[in-house]
């Protein structure tokens, strides 16, 4: 689990084919204190497992599934990536709840400067529109950002100078592709409501009188 608050950047320094996947060797720009083999590290928003640490780099394996659903397959030696280590229970939740499981890839449609801020507009598959709301949260290449506006098959965000300076966002230009993770809470709510067989309204009416295990079981929540 992550927060979408990027710890720092890293550089891909090696790529090795592994079966049908690949292994990345990454040099982070910051010190990874107390490195643990097997820990999760989000690379451009994709949760990967660290398999090797040495004095300056760490390695992660990328499965064929991850390559097919993210932009990681386009990375090359020298590519810069956003890095975030997994959330600890003692950490502040400064962004939003991010799982590191990328939902889709979007394309930068437009980039506009507004004073010190930069407005990015993105295009993506309209099938994912229902998971985005204005002033809600979205993770772009692992960065927790607030949705400014939503359109059919697209949305926009405003990036502050601090975020631009500490992430890859300042490098993004129209035509670039990015990893998108949508709000996990919305996805779970949709799944739970679909389990009621279209009885959301009557459930809400009965829930207003009190919720117990019998009510939850009757509407398919247990």
Image (cartoon, rainbow, N blue to C red):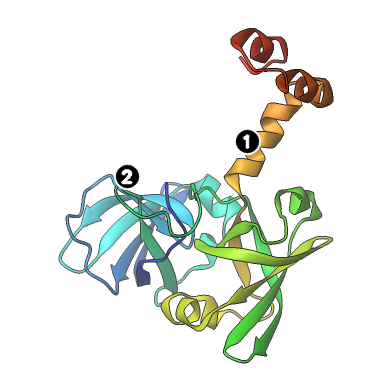
Crowding at dot 2, Cα within 10 Å, few <14 / some 14-19 / many 20+, comes out as few
Give the residue displayed 74% in from the left and 51% down from the top. Answer: 128
- Closer-to-camera residue (129/105): 129
Residue 97, numbered label: none
x, y percentage for residue 25?
32, 63
Q: Residue furthest bottom?
A: 115
Report the residue marked by disc 1: 188
Check the image and name the residue furthest to the top: 214
The answer, for residue 141, to whether it is visible in the render is no
Q: Is residue 26 left or right of residue 75?
A: left
Quadrant location, the C terminus = top right
- On the question of residue 145 being in view, the answer is yes
Nearer mark to the viewer, of 2 and 1 = 2
Compared with 157, 144 (above or below) is: above
Q: Which of 68 and 200 is in front in this view?
A: 200
Question: Callout 1: few (<14), some (14-19), or many (20+) C-alpha neighbours within 10 Å?
Answer: few
Residue 41 versus residue 184 in the image, above or below = below
What secondary structure is marked by label 2?
loop
What's the residue at 21%, 57% (across, down)? 53
Position of residue 98 measured from the top left corner of the image (x, y, whole percent)? 50, 50
Could you tell me which residue is drawn at 20 percent across and 54 percent down? 35
Who is closer to the viewer here, 107 or 166? 166
Q: Which residue is drawn at 23% across and 47% down?
A: 37
32 on left or right of 91 = left
Residue 38 at what x, y percent from top left?
27, 44
- x, y percent for residue 59: 30, 57
* In the foreground, 60 or 111: 111
- The residue labelled by disc 2 is 89
Left or right of 4? Residue 92 is left
Quarter-of-image position of residue 120: bottom right
Tell me if label 2 and label 1 are in contact, CB under 8 Å.
Answer: no
Q: Residue furthest front?
A: 209
């Amino acid at each position: 689990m992550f927060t979408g608050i990027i710890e720092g950047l890293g550089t891909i320094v090696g790529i090795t084919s592994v079966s049908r996947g690949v292994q990345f060797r990454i040099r982070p720009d910051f010190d990874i204190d107390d490195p643990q083999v097997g820990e999760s590290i989000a690379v451009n928003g994709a949760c990967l497992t660290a398999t090797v640490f040495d004095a300056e780099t760490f390695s992660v394996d990328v499965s064929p599934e991850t390559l097919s659903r993210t932009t990681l397959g386009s990375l090359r030696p020298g590519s810069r990536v956003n890095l975030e280590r997994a959330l600890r229970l003692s950490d502040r939740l400064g962004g939003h709840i991010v799982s590191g499981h990328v939902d889709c890839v979007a394309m930068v449609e437009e980039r506009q400067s507004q004073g010190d801020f930069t407005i990015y507009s993105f295009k993506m598959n309209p099938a994912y529109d229902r998971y985005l709301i204005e002033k809600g949260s979205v993770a772009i290449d692992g960065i927790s950002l607030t949705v400014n506006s939503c359109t059919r098959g697209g949305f926009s965000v405003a990036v502050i100078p601090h975020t631009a300076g500490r992430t890859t966002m300042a490098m993004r230009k129209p035509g670039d592709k990015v990893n998108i993770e949508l709000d996990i809470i919305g996805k779970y709510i949709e799944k739970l409501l679909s389990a009621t067989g279209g009885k959301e309204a009557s459930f809400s009416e009965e829930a207003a009188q009190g919720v117990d295990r019998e009510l939850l079981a009757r509407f398919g929540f247990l």
